[in-house]
Image (tube, helix red, strand yellow):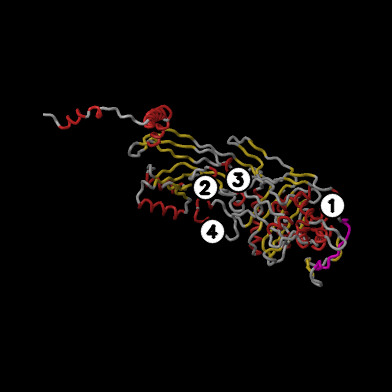
Amino acid sequence: MKWIEEDLIFDNKDQSFKKFALPKYVKFLFIFIYFLYIFMFLKIFFFEKKNWITLAQLNNSLKINISPPRGIILDREGKILADNITSFDLIVDFNQIDNEERLYFENLINENKLNFNFNNNQLIIKKIPQKLASKIIAKYNNLLKVRLVDSYKRIYPYGIGFGNLIGYLGFPSKEEIKNFNYDANSYIGKLSLEKYYQNYLAGKEGEIIFEKDNKLNIIRTIENKDPKIGYSLKLTIDAEFQKKAYEIFDKYMKEKNFHKGGLIVMKVDTGEIISLISYPDFDNNIFIEKSLETKDIFNNPYDPLFNKVISGLYAPGSVIKPIIAVAALEEKIIDPNKKIYSSGELRIANPFFYGQYSIFRDWKAHGWVDMKGAIANSVNVYFYTIGGGYGNQKGLGVNRINKYLKLFGLGNILNIDFPNENSGFIPDPQIKAKKNFDKIWRLGDTYNLSIGQGDLLVTPLQIAVFTAALAKNKLIKPYLVSEILDDNNKVVFKNKPQIIRKDLVDYNNLKIIQEGMRMTVTQGTAKILNYAKVEIAGKSGTPEILGKKKLNAFFTGYAPYNKPEIVMTLFIEEVPIGSIVTLPLYRDLINLYFEKK
């Protein structure tokens, strides 16, 4: 008896065993897949075999990075400003500890004010003190989940007075990790020279690779690579002067109840910075261990982390008057012996409203003054007149004023080797037309510019540099690092003085300005400095701020007058009576410098 299925098959055998024709694209698809599998096999076996073996080894190993000692920072005489001592870093794997242990480490951080980072479920505590390290080893016996590794702790022997100059270390921000590819658990320079020279100071990390078993026990050391110390910096700074200058500065500021200011001392011939103080300052050692105490620094309303000398912008006030004076001589618009009368104000008739005047005030009535007397006594009316013109006396005008401001280094960065240098701002009619509500450049704008007021903004660094230019007739590039040394103490880079521009103006014209600046001290607004240990030439300035409600105080000068060696620029913010408040402190600081010599 046949099965029904057999009958069906034999009755329809032609149809049942007929070949089914696949579409061509399906054939090609199978061929492509076949060759793709062959290609992937060959790729993995021949080309990626090493990578897979490495990955397998990583799963069976533990790599711990060892922080290198950073390069040493020295002053000009070889005194150590930043050094390293041996320390420990603690690495805690939060995946392998329980809640009780987590609480233990949280308390450890809070009680000891430790600096830490938490990344990828790993707690990194940097720079563990020796006693605390011993306590942790006794508790955990250096298990895989809680490990202490050798490290180096940055120390700053001079502390406060050098914090804003040298900087400090800290964990990188997300932006720094993204932009510079820093390891999230490494310490990097976060401010000032530590930040600017990070790539030189950092050194190269070492590493230890351990082999571990399937229970995460360490079996043996596979590789041990020592870290390499970073390059060292030799600065132009005189540490002993900086230290004592800050002490004098700090004492004076506290006695007078002033809160913000700064000092820069620079060699006039080379641009070497001898001292750089931004007040108030901070102790950079706090950032290494006592992370909780850093809150006081970050929350300080007087901003000790902001370098006021290099990044701060200020209306310069009368300190720019010597530039306006030399510009007038260069452009031959006035004879230096011609006298202009100051009644205490300059009145400009309003062209639209009869009997109304715009009044531009002097700080007092000076009577008849020539150019030297105008510099010495800071006569506003004289500089209104030669800057914008008045009566039959022609003025420079805004374009020529700006030409000379730029010639003496204003409006551009000077490329000092320090982060966040500001370029300042020089106003002009084109900029005002674009940005201001009142788009018209008026005579009053030129008058304000002529005495360093209005929208003009400069940095104290720029004031120091143009003061040096007035002393030596050349614009010099300032710098802080004189040499970079490798780990064998071999010089790999040596900074040399760089002249940005020389022979700025005619020497005979400059001599008149210098004599006027000397008269500032002998018979003008800074007579107290006539009792200093050396002869000083300089210029005071009292720019108005906060809607003329408060004053800043500047004095900038060079010494000795007949053979200039240094320029010193001092400023104090928000004072009651103007530039006179800087003079006793300036005298003490310049005496300190020359007593040390």
Q: Is mark 3 on a helix, strand or loop?
A: helix
Q: Marks 3/4: CA distance?
A: 24 Å
- The amino acid at mark 3 is Tyr
| Residue at point 77%, 57% (across, down) | 539
Name the residue that disc number 3 marks: 196
Label of residue 172 in the image = 2
Label 4: how many Cα within 10 Å (few below 14, some 14–19, many 20+): few
Residue found at the very far front of the displayed protein: 11
Q: What type is the residue that disc 4 sits on?
A: Asp
From the image, state whether disc 2 or disc 1 is nearer to you.
1
Question: Could you tell which of marks 3 and 1 lies nearer the N-terminus?
Answer: 3
Q: In this view, does 590 lie above or below 50?
A: below
Q: What residue type is labelled 1?
A: Glu
Residue 551 lies left or right of residue 55; in this view the side is right
Task: Let me know if residue 261 is in the magenta part.
Answer: no
Classify 350 as above or below 32: below
342 magenta-colored: yes
Give the mark nearer the N terminus: 2 vs 3: 2
Front tag of 3 and 4: 3
Residue 156: x %, y % from top left: 57, 48
Furthest-left residue in view?
1
Question: Is the residue 58 above or below the residue 328 in the image?
Answer: above
Between discs 3 and 4, the one toward the N terminus: 3
| Disc 3 and disc 1 in contact, CB within 8 angstroms | no
218 or 430: nearer the viewer: 430
What kind of element bears circle 1? loop
Look at the image and give the residue range highlighted in magenta: 334-351
